[in-house]
Image (tube, rainbow, N blue to C red):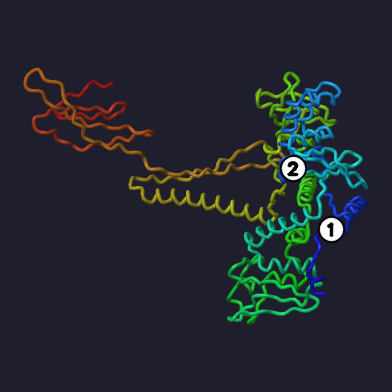
Amino acid sequence: MMSEVLQRSVSIGSKGAPDPVDHFLERHLLYRKHMVMDPSCLFRVIAEQVYDSQMLHHEVRMECVRYMFRKRRSFRRFVSGDYDEYLWQLELARTPGTMLELRALAHLYRRNIIIYKPFDLGRLVIDRKDYPETLRIFVSNRGHFDSVLEKSDIEMAAIAQAVAFKMLYKHFFRLPDIDFAVEWMLYPETFRWGTDLEFDPLGNVIRLLCRNGRSFKLDRPENTRCILANYRECPFHNPNIKLGRYMMSCMRRFLERNRPPISYMTAKSLDPYMYRNVELSCLNKDIREGNNSNVYKGDYDFKVGAKCQVELEAKRQLSVCHIQAINEDKSSCLVFVEGQGKFQDVPYKNLHPPPPSEFQPWDCQPKKRFSRNRRNQLRRIKRQRQKEQWQRQMNQRQDFKETDPGPKKQSQPTPPVKCQVESRPDQQISTVPSVPQFSTPPPQAIPRPVFLPAPPPLFGPPGIMTHQLMIRPPGPIFYVTPPRVEAPTGLMPLPFVVRNSSVMINSVNEPKPPPT
């Protein structure tokens, strides 16, 4: 009885497959892994089974085109029409793959092919003894391709998926008691029979034992992080809060209050007995978010401002462009071609999405908007800063007036000017407000002695002249008599004249010049 409880079969993590074809395959220990409904489904299947990643579907498509170009003689007879045009269309992401491309990829990667159809257990399409591996592919009646996995493949994939998610949530995020949370959310009947606790020599709980034979190691607070917004409110991670000898982690408190700390999709991915189609879930979620946010998702539903590729009629090649405008009927659009550096009108059908390696997804996060209280607060802060700046300027002017040593003239306030108009019953006399007058100190000229070499006289040794310069400041002129500076011994004083003045100052023993 105990062994039957401990043993679990690997499931797909859903309540039940809605498609009867899936029920038919499950009865024969087969599992159909669904692919996203797009033209690249065949290349996604091959990329996943050959490279273990669906993200390389574009590279698989290009390898198929190059291989079919080299093997022209082998595949030319299966194509009706121009073979080069067929390969050109196959490079585009909107062209779906067919059985011809499946055969080409089988020979390219040296794989045998087993094709499954609805209510059919499969048949070998390509069987070569020198091909070591076999690809299992399901083809629907509409030409859609899906992967078919055996039960052994599902068991290995479930374990690998659980290991990857556990490394992320347990060792990177360091969530406490993550194994206990997965068991509580997915298998609640485990704890209905009762549990026991195991303690270490220091009295700390280290393990939880279930009556059905399962046990879970409990984490310590020093090795984990709190899942609450504020760890100070968590008794498990905050040592200042003492609620007793035995303290449960914040993860277990959430579970006992029937509040799942993680999503059920994450719990299924962490369980080694469940395999979840993570790629399909993520792609469908991205498509829904893109449709709700009206952003470009890298497909043929182009948006204004998207960076894509355009097919020019003059040359059979793709050029990088940026969409500027799109007609309402989506017949033509205006694009900016990077290679040519100009705007050009092109048909809408000539636009193609960029390769997945060059595509940069748009930001789907909604822009944060300030609330009304926040906007009012910012306005008050702005007005307060402007007021403080104006007050600081007025204080600087007042300090300049008080520290001014020059003479000040009492400036009388200018009386307000009254403007009288013709007396009318609907008009009144208006008064112009007075303009404040700020008195500034008059500029002053500061004389300084400058000694310049004088020209040699007719008789005697050369001498040096002394000259005092008067610098004329801007504004009204105020003339100040400079102090007498005696020339050094043996030097001749040079006269100086202040022009444009009613007062002329001359040196000693010098005749006055005629008035100008």
Comparing 196 with 405, the one in front is: 196
Q: Is residue 226 left or right of residue 68?
A: left
Residue 515, above or below 439 = above
Are there few (<14), some (14-19), or many (20+) residues within 10 Å of tag 2? few
Q: Quadrant of residue 295?
A: top right
Decide which of 189, 476 is in the foreground and name it: 189
- Residue 261 picture location, percent across and down: 73, 65
- Residue at disc 1, secondary structure: loop
Name the side, left or right, on which 433 lies relative to 499. right
Instruction: Tell me, for residue 14, which label it has, or none.
Output: 1
Q: Quadrant of the N terminus?
A: bottom right
- At 73% across and 31% down in the image, what residue appears? 323
Q: Residue at x 81, y 72 (%)?
A: 189
Label of residue 286 in the image: none
Is residue 446 in sight in this rendering? yes
Q: Nearer the viewer, residue 411 or 322?
A: 322
Residue drawn where x is 36% and y is 50% of the image: 403
Q: CA distance from mark 2 to mark 1?
A: 34 Å
User: Which of labels 2 and 1 is toward the front?
Assistant: 2
Q: Read off the residue under disc 2.
A: 132
Quick one: quadrant of the C terminus?
A: top left
Asked whether residue 296 appears in the rendered view, the answer is: no
Q: Position of residue 469 (x, y in %)?
A: 25, 31
Left or right? Give the position of 31 relative to 487. right
Q: Decide: few, some or many residues near mark 1? Use Cα within 10 Å; few <14, some 14-19, many ≥20.
A: few
Of labels 2 and 1, earlier in sequence is 1
